[in-house]
């Protein structure tokens, strides 16, 4: 006996939404193909043409997911080598330690295009900005600014930190300013000698702590060299990526940090600079709407500071997990959404909390900086290794109703970082001068 397909409407064409669409269009066994009869997918994007705001992304779990889609070769064409990436940590000119990991670096625009090109064009509806959502007991009615309407059994809000869907269905809220800002320069002219090595420099100048991150994303014509300055700020700078700044602002702050060669080179080669305020989502009791017809995903659920490099990875992992569950005919929609939340919510919230904490690590001064430098290799790096190693399980998450692989990660993170956090907080308070 045939049953009608589950109609899923994805709101938002970022990496999370696109990954969910790709997952749902695969068969329930995970092979490539025309998709499953169980699910009918439509993805609605507000813009009438593809645009991308943002810069470089480091993919760990995200890389493994894209490879599971059969997109490994296309990913390799736009990302730098994913086999032997390294992050080196330096404090005031002295190298402290390094972290090697399997992953890749690519520009967000290239990753988005890779996924868009892999999807059937008929499932994507550009120029569809949602202006109203009405949840019923059995379906959801969507109204768009262009006058179109649509209905679905499930709406997935993948529309970012300022999610309209979340505000409409779950109630109004506001992103929380973390107290950090990032001055971010981008150059398509290669100037870094080794693109497989990312460097983090911790600098203290006039009693103020700064983190300087330099990295390369992409290869060949897709290559961009990036330099980011992390600093504390009382001013709630916008988080909109279209808020560009003049290069002189980046140069002004860079000059305060002495003779760090990478900053001088970044200033000379930067083509565009951003002044980017860092925000996170407030925690919510649930990601599932009261009627069980709308669910949150990615930044709409757990926008995070970027200091652990996990925003895109978590969104893609959310999408992979939810998609695999929805494809499982043995799991009802209500049970499936609860399983998705049980698998993802605690882990993602633990990463959000520790990403903000990592901002404090990057900008520490005095006793806290000394503690950071001394215990980096024994505490901070193991946490990063655990996070980077977290990825999609080899089995469908819908078959794991208890003790999923990634549910152990929050516990591991809490245990391994508990000592750090207690001693860190016990250090004498060090004042910071905000910029």
Image (cartoon, grey):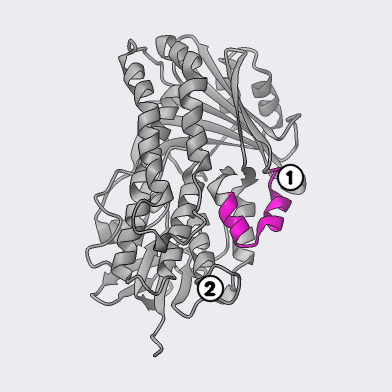
Q: Position of residue 116 (x, y in %)?
A: 60, 64
**Crowd rating for badge 1 (residues with CA inside 10 Å; few <14, some 14–19, many 20+):** some
Instruction: Look at the image and tell me whether residue 235 can be seen.
Output: no
Locate residue 205, reporting x and y percent: 51, 11
Rendered image quadrant of residue 434: top left
Decide: is 359 above or below 365: below
Whether 209 is among the magenta residues is no
Q: Are marks 2 and 1 in contact (CB under 8 Å)?
A: no
Task: Let me know if residue 67 is in the magenta part.
Answer: yes
In the image, residue 396 sits, relative to residue 280, either above or below, namely: below
Image quarter of the C terminus: top left
From which residue to which does the magenta span run?
63-81
- Is 31 situated above or below 387? below
| Relative height, residue 234 to residue 150 (above, below) | above
- What numbered label is drawn on residue 219? 1
Mark number displayed over residue 27: 2
Mark 2 or mark 1: which is in front? Answer: 2
Q: Residue furthest bottom?
A: 1
Compare residues 266 and 286 and report the one nearer the observer.
Answer: 286
Q: Is 24 in front, or is 295?
A: 24
Write the residue at 23% across / 67% down: 291
Disc 2 element: loop
Between 261 and 347, which is closer to the camera in this rendering? 347
Badge number at residue 69: none
Q: Is there any visible trace of residue 277 in the rendered image?
A: yes
| 426 sits to left or right of 393 | left
């Amino acid at each position: 006996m045939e049953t009608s397909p589950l109609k899923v409407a994805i709101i938002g064409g970022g990496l999370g939404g696109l990954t969910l669409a790709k997952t749902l269009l695969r068969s329930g066994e995970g092979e490539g193909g025309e998709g499953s009869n169980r699910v009918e997918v439509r993805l609605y994007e507000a813009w009438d043409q593809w645009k991308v705001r943002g810069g470089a992304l480091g993919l760990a779990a995200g890389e493994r997911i894209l490879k599971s889609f059969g997109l490994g070769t296309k990913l390799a064409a736009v990302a730098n080598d994913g086999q032997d990436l390294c992050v080196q940590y330096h404090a005031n000119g002295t190298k402290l330690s390094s972290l090697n990991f399997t992953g890749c670096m690519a520009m967000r625009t290239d990753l988005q295009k890779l996924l868009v090109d892999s999807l059937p064009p008929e499932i994507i509806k550009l120029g569809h900005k949602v202006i109203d959502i009405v949840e019923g007991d059995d379906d959801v009615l969507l109204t768009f600014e262009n006058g179109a309407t649509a209905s679905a059994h499930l709406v997935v809000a993948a529309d970012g930190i300022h999610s309209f869907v979340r505000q409409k269905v779950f109630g109004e809220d506001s992103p929380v300013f973390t107290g950090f800002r990032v001055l971010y320069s981008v150059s398509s002219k290669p100037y870094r000698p080794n693109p497989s090595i990312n460097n983090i420099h911790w600098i203290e100048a006039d009693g103020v702590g700064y983190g300087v991150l330099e990295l390369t994303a992409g290869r060949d014509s897709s290559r961009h060299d990036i330099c980011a300055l992390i600093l504390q700020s009382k001013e709630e700078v916008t988080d909109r990526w279209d808020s560009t700044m003049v290069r002189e602002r980046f140069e002004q702050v860079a000059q305060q940090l002495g003779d760090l060669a990478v900053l001088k080179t970044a200033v000379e080669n930067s083509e565009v600079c951003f002044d980017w305020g860092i925000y996170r989502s407030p925690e919510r009791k649930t990601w599932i709407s009261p009627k069980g017809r709308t669910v949150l995903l990615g930044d709409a659920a757990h926008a995070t500071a970027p200091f652990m490099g996990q925003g895109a990875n978590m969104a893609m992992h959310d999408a992979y997990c939810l998609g695999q569950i929805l494809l499982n005919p043995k799991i009802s929609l209500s049970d499936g959404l609860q399983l998705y939340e049980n698998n993802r919510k605690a882990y993602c919230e633990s990463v959000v909390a520790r990403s903000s904490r990592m901002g404090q690590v990057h900008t520490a001064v005095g006793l806290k900086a000394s503690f950071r430098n001394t215990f980096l290799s024994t505490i901070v790096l193991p946490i990063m290794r655990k996070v980077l190693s977290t990825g999609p399980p080899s089995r469908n998450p819908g078959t794991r109703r208890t003790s999923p692989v990634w549910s152990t990660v929050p516990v591991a993170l809490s245990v391994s970082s508990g000592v750090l956090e207690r001693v860190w907080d016990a250090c004498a308070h060090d004042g910071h001068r905000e910029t």
